[in-house]
Image: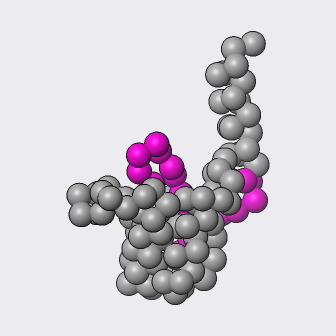
Amino acid sequence: MNPRKNLNQTRGRRVRRVRAKISGTSQKPRLAVFRSNRHIYAQLIDDEKNHTLASASSREFAKQKSKEKKTGQAGLVGGLIAKKAIAAGVKTAVLDRRAYKYHGRVKAVAEEAKKGGLKI
């Protein structure tokens, strides 16, 4: 079997396994984190209404924080999503880490969101 195809199937199973256990509501939305090689993105999603409540990404301050390492940029995204969540009236969220380990950039987003006042 093609190794790349096998890797994608394994990643897809991990994503489905994580998503089967969590769901976002308007009171407790899902904090979805996506990592690319260059940037990191976070969204607060209400799955009942299929609506994004707030979003933040490292692209928003890519120009002025370009010297910051990727983990540092992820921390800034976590703080920004926490501010936007509080402004939208959200106090708690459930973390959707997709197929990523709770480590590195994903952990930095979650920890800074917690420090920013968002209960995860």
Residue 110: image quadrant is: bottom right
| Residue at left offset 30%, top offset 57% | 66
The answer to whether residue 106 of the structure is visible from this angle is yes
Vertical arrangement, residue 40 with respect to residue 23, above or below: above
| Residue at left offset 58%, top offset 74% | 111
Residue 53: image quadrant is: bottom left
In this figure, what is the number of numbered marks?
Answer: 0
Looking at this view, name the residue that lies furthest to the left. Answer: 63
Residue 78 belongs to magenta span: no
Vertical arrangement, residue 100 with respect to residue 87, above or below: above
Region rendered in magenta: 18-40
> How far from the left and from the top, in percent, is residue 57?
38, 60
> How far from the left and from the top, in percent, is residue 95?
63, 66
Residue situated in front as seen by the camera: 57 or 84: 57
Looking at this view, name the residue that lies furthest to the front. Answer: 67
> How far from the left and from the top, in percent, is residue 117?
52, 86
Residue 93: image quadrant is: bottom right
In the picture, which quadrant includes the N terminus? Answer: top right
| Residue at left offset 52%, top offset 76% | 113
Residue 30 belongs to magenta span: yes
Vertical arrangement, residue 38 with respect to residue 111, above or below: above
| Residue at left offset 53%, top offset 67% | 109
Q: Would residue 82 be found to the left or right of residue 5 on screen?
A: left
In the picture, which quadrant includes the C terminus? Answer: bottom right
The answer to whether residue 55 of the structure is visible from this angle is no
Residue situated in front as seen by the camera: 69 or 19: 69
Q: Would residue 76 be found to the left or right of residue 46 on screen?
A: left
The colour scheme applied to this rendered structure is one colour
